[in-house]
Image: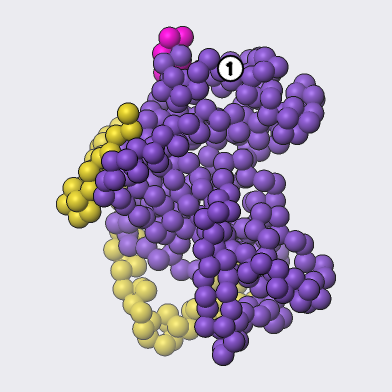
């Protein structure tokens, strides 16, 4: 246990140190062009023009004047632009694996403590000069913009951070690996102390659409259960003897090697109900329950991945 | 401090069950067994902290010695010895 905690803390510290060094490394203009070519982008501009990625995302995704964009919109447009740059390399990585057919690594974990992705992805893709220019051109407050990204509520301790470090390392070592986990919608709880006691509030980190994840609706998987699940007084209870089906919906996130040569995948599974057979029941049972945005399903089916309880650390 | 409710002023006696388990019911899980050596180490740590150079030296050696815990090294070893997986570079 102690070895694992020590290991993950050591790795977190080392990662931070490596990222700082990378931030200060200047890259010449031709190296920038080479970089874009490596990502298969062609002569595309990151920002500073009405046809550049950043401005286009603000205009076409949000239908707003780029000059009046708020903090969250600017974060989303930056993240989407970064994702645009890596998309072709991401597809190329998968295409290479399918062609070469190497032995693959499947890393399953209940948690991936990935934190915020924007600065990590910019650093690993060596996109700092592009971002710096965007900051100058658009007068962005970069640290403030980074703060607009919610912490991914996908893990809470050493085990999750170790899994995230391992994914990063597998990509950097060019290993054909994929991470599998669950897409907790409410993530960890928000902790407050009231009268000396802890009170938990839900942390809905996916309230706004996450700019990194890619929904793969055609790769949903049916999972047949030997029971049904019902909500009673706020907790989920299995009802034996009545079988049911839930649908696993995969969401992919890029895992970028340092240097951006390999882009692996972290596939997180959300849960939806089997078509709409009990939509009515759902509405009757909990009229104030919001229709989940990204994974249409009933409250019952959605509960499996709704939150990650802060149980004991399984390290 | 604990028994005088220093940490539980708004709720006197909140930690009595913990005290009882440790002091009255024989400390079944031996939480206090290494308290003495823990305090010894804490004392040495405080002494070292007053010695700026000695502290800096140990801190630097500690960081330098953590290289082995790099996840790149760990993954390379797993891939090589356990998974028998090879890199698949993307052209």
Chain B display color: yellow
Residue carrying label 1: A45
Q: Nearer the viewer, residue B7 or A26?
A: A26
Q: The magenta stretch spans which residues?
A: A25-32
* Image point (54%, 63%), residue name: A248
Image-quadrant location for residue A210: top right
Q: Which quadrant holds the C terminus of chain A? A: bottom left
- Vertical placement of A204 versus A210: above or below? below
- Vertical placement of A21 versus B55: above or below? above
Q: Is residue A44 left or right of residue B51?
A: right
Q: Is residue A294 visible?
A: yes
Look at the numbered disc 1 and give the secondary structure of its residue.
loop
Colour purple, chain: A
Residue B29 position, x and y percent, is: 36, 79
Q: Is residue A12 left or right of residue A292?
A: left
- Furthest toward the top, the residue is A29
């Amino acid at each position: 246990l102690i070895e694992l905690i020590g290991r993950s803390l050591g790795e977190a510290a080392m990662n931070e140190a490596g990222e700082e060094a990378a931030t200060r490394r200047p890259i010449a203009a031709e190296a920038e062009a080479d970089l874009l070519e490596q990502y298969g982008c062609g002569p595309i501009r990151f920002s500073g023009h009405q046809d550049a990625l950043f401005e286009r995302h603000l205009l076409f995704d949000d239908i707003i004047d780029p000059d009046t964009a708020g903090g969250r919109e600017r974060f989303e447009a930056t993240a989407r632009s970064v994702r645009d740059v890596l998309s072709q390399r991401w597809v190329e990585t998968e295409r290479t694996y399918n062609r070469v057919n190497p032995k693959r690594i499947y890393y399953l974990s209940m948690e991936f403590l990935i934190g915020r992705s924007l600065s990590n992805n910019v650093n690993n893709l060596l996109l700092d000069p592009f971002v710096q220019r965007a900051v100058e051109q658009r007068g962005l407050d970069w640290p403030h913009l980074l703060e607009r990204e919610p912490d991914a509520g996908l893990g809470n301790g050493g085990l999750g951070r170790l899994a995230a470090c391992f994914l990063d390392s597998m990509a950097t070592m060019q290993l054909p690996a994929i991470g599998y986990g669950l897409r907790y919608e409410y993530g960890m709880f928000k902790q407050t102390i009231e009268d000396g006691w802890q009170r938990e509030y839900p942390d809905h980190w996916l309230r706004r659409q996450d700019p990194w994840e890619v929904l793969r609706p055609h790769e949903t998987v049916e999972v047949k259960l030997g029971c049904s699940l019902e909500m009673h007084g706020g907790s989920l209870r299995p009802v034996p003897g009545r079988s049911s089906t839930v649908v696993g919906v995969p969401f992919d996130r890029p895992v970028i090697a340092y240097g951006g040569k390999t882009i692996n995948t972290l596939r997180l599974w959300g849960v939806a109900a089997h078509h709409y057979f009990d939509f009515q029941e759902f509405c009757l049972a909990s009229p104030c329950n919001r229709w989940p945005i990204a994974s249409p399903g009933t409250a019952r089916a959605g509960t499996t991945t709704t939150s990650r309880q802060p149980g004991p650390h399984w390290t | 401090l604990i028994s005088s409710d220093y940490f539980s002023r708004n709720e006197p006696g909140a930690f009595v069950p913990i005290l009882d388990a440790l002091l009255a019911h024989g400390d079944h899980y031996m939480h206090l067994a290494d308290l003495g050596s823990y305090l010894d180490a804490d004392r040495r740590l405080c002494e070292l902290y007053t010695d700026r150079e000695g502290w800096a030296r140990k801190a630097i050696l500690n960081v330098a010695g953590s290289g082995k815990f790099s996840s790149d090294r760990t993954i390379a070893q797993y891939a090589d010895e356990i998974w028998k997986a090879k890199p698949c570079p993307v052209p």
